[in-house]
Image (cartoon, rainbow, N blue to C red):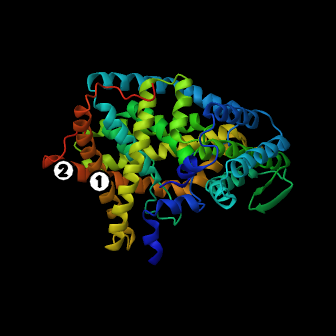
Amino acid sequence: MLIIDKYAYSNRLADSDPFLKFIVVVIALAITTTIRSIYINIMIFAMMSFMTTKVAGIPLDKYFRILSIPMGFLLISTITILVSVSKIDIFVYSINMFDYYIGITISSMEESIYIVTRVVASMGAAFFLGLTTPLNNLVKVFRKLHLPKSIIELIVLIYRSIFIFLEEAQEIHTGQELKFGYSNFKNSLRSTGLLLRSLFLRVLLRYKEMVIILECKLYDGEFKTGD
Amino acid sequence: MKNIKYLGLSVFLLLLSTPSISHGMHIMEGFLPAKWAIFWAVLALPFLILGLKNINKLFKEDVNAKVLLGLAGGFVFVLSALKIPSVTGSCSHPTGVGLGAILFGPTVMTVIGTIVLLFQALLLAHGGLTTLGANIFSMGIVGPIISYGIFKGLKKTNMNRTYVTFLAAALGNLATYCITATQLAIAFPDPASGLVGSLMKFLTVFAVTQIPLAIVEGLLTAIVYNLLIEYKEKGVISIENI
C-alpha cells in the first residue's frame, strides 16, 4: 500500500471537482516556475499546505514526512549549485586549497535560496494534487484534456498492475529475508535477481490469465475508461 | 557487514517515510525554471509521439499487447520503487528501463517510461510534474536507446551474452545520469567557471551514488536476463527479443 495513494482516496476533497484542482495546481506551478519571487513562492506553499492539511484533512506529521522524501536530492543539488571552484578569489566565503579557491558567491547564494523556495512551493502544489485526487478522478481530467485513448488505457492498466506486483514483491522479499537471502552483499544481489525473475514470470503468467479472462468477457481490444 | 541486509529491498512504506539521499536519478519537482522545463518537454515530445505511433500499431496487430504492456509498466514501476543492494550505503533504485528496452524495444519504453514517471511523481513523491519532460528525456528516451543500441549491436558479435546485457544496462543507466547532470548544468551554470564547471560539479557529486548504482543495475539485469534465458530454453516462457 502506498501512503500517498491511501490519502488520495480517504481525504475530504477526494470527491471534489478534479478539473478545478488540476487547474489550480497548474496555475500554481506556472507561477512558481516563471515568476522569480521568494515571497510569492512562500505564499503559494502556505496556501497549498493549508489546503492539503486543513481543508483536505491530511495529518500534518504525515504531510511533512511525505514532503521530506525528496529533500536529499534538494540538499545535494543545492550545495552543488552553491559551491564553486575558481583560480581567482571572487567569493564571499572561501577556502584556499592549493591553487584554487572553493567558495560561495553572492549570485549563487541568491540562486540557491530562490531554488529552495521554488522547489518547496512546487512540491506543495504537486502534492496537493497527488494527495487529494484519486486516480479515477485524474483519469477524468486526462479525458477532458483529450489525451490519446491508448495512453489513458495504459495509465489505468499500469496503475492496477502496480499494486498487484508491489504486493507480490513484498511477499517474496519477506520470504527471502527469512531465509537469510539478504545476509551479505553477494546474497542480496542474487536474491534481488531471483525476486525480479519471479516477478517477471508473474507478469507473463498474469498476462496469460488475463487474456483468457478478457476473452470470456468478449474483449474486443478496447478498455472502457468511463465513456 | 551486518547492516548490509537492510540495504536490500526494503518495505515500501519505509521508502515512503524515510528521507533518502540518493534520488539523483530524477530531477525533483520545481527544480528547473519554466524555460528549461518547457525546453526538455518539447524535445521529448517527438519521441513520445513516435512511441505512441508504434504502440498503436502494436495494439492493432495484437489486441492483447495492451494487457502485456500494462503489466510490464507495473513491473517497471515496482522495479524503480525497489531498494537494491548498493555499495555506498545509501538506498538507491534502478531505472529498470535497461531490461525493459531489451525486452520491448526503446520506443515502447518511452511511452511506458513516461507513465511510470508520472506515477512516480504522484505516488512516490519522486521526480515531478514540472520536470516530467526533462526526466522523460533522460530516463525514457536516452537510457533505453543506449541500452537497446548496445544490446542489439553487441548481440551479433560472439561476446558472452551476460557481458552484453551487463554493458547494455549499466551504460544505459550511466547515460541517464550523464543527461540528468547535463540538464542541471545547463539550467544552473556556475558563476565562476560557467557551464563546463557546473557540469563537472554535478557529474562528480552524483558519481558517488550513480556509478556503483549503474554497476549494480548491470549485474542485476544480467542475472535476470540469464534466468529468463534458462526458462526460455526449457520452454516455460516465450519471448522473441531475447
Tell me, yes or no, whether the two marked residues, 2 and 1, touch with CB atoms within 8 Å.
yes
As displayed, is residue A155 above or below residue A205? above
Residue A188, image x, y percentages: 37, 66
Residue type at the position of mark 2: Tyr
Label 2 in the same subunit as label 1: no
Tag 1 secondary structure: helix
At 48% from the left edge and 47% from the top edge, which residue is drawn? B174
Q: Which residue is mark 1?
A: A197
Which of these two is toward me, B78 or A97? B78
Residue type at the position of mark 1: Arg
Q: Which residue is mark 2?
A: B231
| Residue B25 visible from this viewpoint | no
Kindly identify which numbered label has been placed on residue B156.
none
Q: Locate residue A142: give its quadrant.
A: top right
Tag 2 secondary structure: helix
Which of these two is toward me, A174 or B85? A174
Which of these two is toward me, A26 or B133? A26
Work out which residue is located at the far bottom of the displayed protein and give it.
B2
At 63% from the left edge and 41% from the top edge, which residue is drawn? A129
As displayed, is residue A209 above or below residue A215? below
Residue A71, image x, y percentages: 65, 55
Q: Residues within 10 Å of mark 1 (few under 14, many from 20)?
A: many
Residue A226, image x, y percentages: 46, 28
As displayed, is residue B45 above or below residue A41? above
User: Would residue A192 be found to the left or right of residue B229 on screen?
Assistant: right
